[in-house]
């Protein structure tokens, strides 16, 4: 892939930034669970002139600190993640696409989910090349706080300290908390919720400290420990919110009393606002400690929105985009991405355009690994293939000449959208279904009619995926299928199986 180009850029970056222990930038990877591109007051989508355009949901959510970071940096209108959480989380750690690392489904902590026989249910191990392990070798104090979901229970990857982190705050095998309430001990004190009880936060049990607040306080303590060691830090701040259960964060409940939306939708909004407070608290603390100018923040979602609004496949949770978490549509794959210094200033290692919206090229979660290595002068091992490209030229307001504008999400499993691969190349998007009947989407639509095997969308002129052009554009369809198949083969993708255990592969129409 682009390993050689990345290494050349890294060598240039090391020369340019003159990395040493005193000026290596601190990094905060701020990951939000189930937060889609529309779950913020920051307008992420753009109009035909490339200007940010507010939509209804931007008026509903309250995220002033995301607005603050966006004014100080760059937001992307077209940034992609996998359609469910564990594949994205492993991609962030490895820089590889899910078809290559083979964590293609969310990891059930106890038993292997159905899918290809040898899909990587066991997740990450200590033998894998991971971002925190590389940063640790480069002198970084590596901190994990929040939701991990890297491996099942009883496997080593369930504990982030086995994957290169010096500190693990509340990270474990599962992805949904037993409870967000300290009064419940985050599930530990409620027998009905104990199966998903959050570990390691006993000091907050029987208090009114909400889970998002508890893991933020502990992350701040770990940052201070790093500053005392005079070591640069890498904080992977990974919120359990806004995953279900949709419990109301009482600090923000009054803000949504008159919203006109359902109780679960209002609770989801309070979870988002609590995450936003966490971001602001971190930025304020960095400023108070005098290290804000040397701290890079990358904020991103792990998959499309799961806001409890309307049905799964229509224009509700991600409106005006189609679909939500777990689907093959833009609402299931497009996520917020904002990058900026905690405080712009002369101490920044490199410049980032301010109050900018990047819409000319796409970005992907695989790029974050490459970007952090680039920013920190950390070398990627020669034998480790990465599928991402550094985003630093785009953060500086430039076009990235090494960027190939394509994204592939491969999902050979049953879920909301089932047994599909979706492939975007420049402005065209292909959806290929391995099975067109007997899946969740067909049942949800209460229709006996098979779903289309191919869907083709011109996202430049039809960003909301309303006109399937597969029949009208047979040559374009054929080209994208061939490109998709080539990438699947290059990445060693596994395929869905039919009932006779026969492999189902894409085929030209």
Image (tube, rainbow, N blue to C red):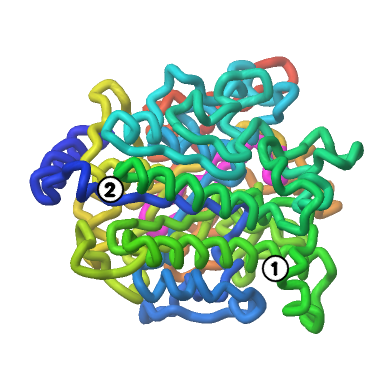
Q: What residue is rendered at 56% in x and 58% in y?
A: 330
Residue 134, relative to residue 230: is it above or below? above
Residue 230, relative to residue 343: is it above or below? above
Q: Residue furthest right?
A: 191
User: Measured from the top left, where is residue 205 in percent x and y?
Assistant: 77, 46
Q: How many marks?
A: 2
Tell me which segment is drawn in magenta: 415-435
Q: Which of 32 and 500 is in front in this view?
A: 32
User: Measured from the top left, where is residue 286 in percent x and y?
Assistant: 40, 61
Which label sits on residue 390?
2
Which label sits on residue 42?
none
At label 1, counting other C-alpha atoms closer than 10 Å, the crowd grade (few under 14, some 14-19, many 20 or more) is many
Q: What residue is rendered at 49% in x and 35% in y?
A: 167
User: Measured from the top left, where is residue 502 in percent x and y?
Assistant: 64, 17
Residue 274, relative to residue 71: is it above or below? above
Q: Quadrant of residue 465?
A: bottom right
Mark 1 lies on residue = 269
Q: Residue furthest left?
A: 15
Precedes in sequence: disc 2 or disc 1: 1
Looking at the rendered structure, the secondary structure element under dot 2 is loop
Q: In which quarter of the image is residue 276?
A: bottom right
């Amino acid at each position: 892939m682009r390993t050689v180009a990345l290494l050349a850029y890294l060598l240039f970056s090391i020369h340019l930034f003159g990395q040493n222990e005193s000026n290596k930038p601190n990094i905060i990877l701020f990951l939000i669970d189930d937060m889609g591109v529309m779950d913020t007051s920051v307008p992420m989508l753009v109009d035909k002139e490339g200007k940010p355009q507010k939509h209804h949901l931007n008026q509903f959510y309250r995220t002033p600190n995301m607005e603050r970071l966006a004014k100080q940096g760059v937001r992307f209108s077209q940034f992609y993640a996998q359609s469910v959480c564990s594949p994205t989380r492993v991609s962030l750690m490895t820089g590889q696409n899910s078809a290559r690392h083979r964590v293609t489904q969310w990891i059930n902590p106890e038993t292997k989910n159905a899918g290809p026989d040898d899909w990587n249910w066991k997740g990450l191990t200590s033998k894998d090349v991971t971002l925190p392990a590389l940063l640790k070798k480069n002198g970084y104090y590596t901190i994990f706080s929040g939701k991990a979901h890297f491996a099942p229970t009883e496997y080593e990857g369930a504990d982030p300290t086995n994957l290169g982190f010096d500190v693990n705050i509340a990270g474990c095998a599962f992805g949904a908390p037993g409870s967000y309430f300290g009064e419940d001990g985050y599930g530990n004190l409620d027998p009905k919720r104990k199966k998903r009880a959050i570990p390691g936060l006993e000091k907050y049990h029987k208090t009114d400290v909400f889970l998002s607040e508890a893991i933020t306080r502990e992350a701040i303590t770990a940052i201070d420990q790093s500053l005392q060691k005079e070591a640069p830090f890498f904080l992977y701040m990974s919120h359990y919110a806004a995953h279900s259960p949709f419990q109301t964060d009482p600090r923000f409940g009054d803000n949504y009393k008159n919203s006109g939306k359902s109780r679960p939708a209002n609770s989801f909004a309070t979870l988002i606002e609590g995450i936003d407070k966490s971001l602001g608290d971190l930025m304020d603390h960095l400023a108070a400690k005098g290290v804000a100018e040397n701290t890079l923040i990358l904020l991103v979602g792990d998959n499309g929105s799961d806001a409890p609004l309307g049905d799964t496949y229509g224009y509700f949770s991600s409106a005006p985009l189609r679909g939500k978490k777990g689907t093959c549509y833009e609402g299931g794959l497009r996520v917020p991405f904002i990058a900026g210094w905690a405080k712009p200033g002369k101490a920044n290692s490199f410049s980032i355009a301010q109050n900018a919206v990047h819409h000319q090229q796409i970005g992907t979660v695989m790029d974050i690994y490459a970007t952090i290595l680039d920013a920190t002068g950390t070398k990627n091992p020669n034998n480790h293939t990465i599928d991402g490209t550094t985003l630093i030229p785009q953060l500086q307001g430039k076009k990235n000449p090494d960027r190939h504008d394509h994204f592939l999400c491969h999902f050979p499993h049953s879920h909301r959208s089932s047994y599909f691969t979706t492939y975007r190349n420049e402005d065209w998007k292909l959806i290929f279904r391995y099975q067109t009947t007997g899946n969740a989407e067909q049942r949800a639509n209460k229709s006996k009619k098979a779903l289309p095997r191919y869907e083709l969308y011109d996202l430049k002129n039809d960003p909301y995926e309303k006109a399937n052009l597969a029949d009208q554009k047979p040559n374009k369809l054929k080209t994208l299928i061939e490109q998709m198949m080539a990438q699947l083969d290059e990445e060693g993708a596994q395929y869905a199986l039919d009932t006779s255990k026969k492999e189902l592969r894409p085929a030209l129409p």
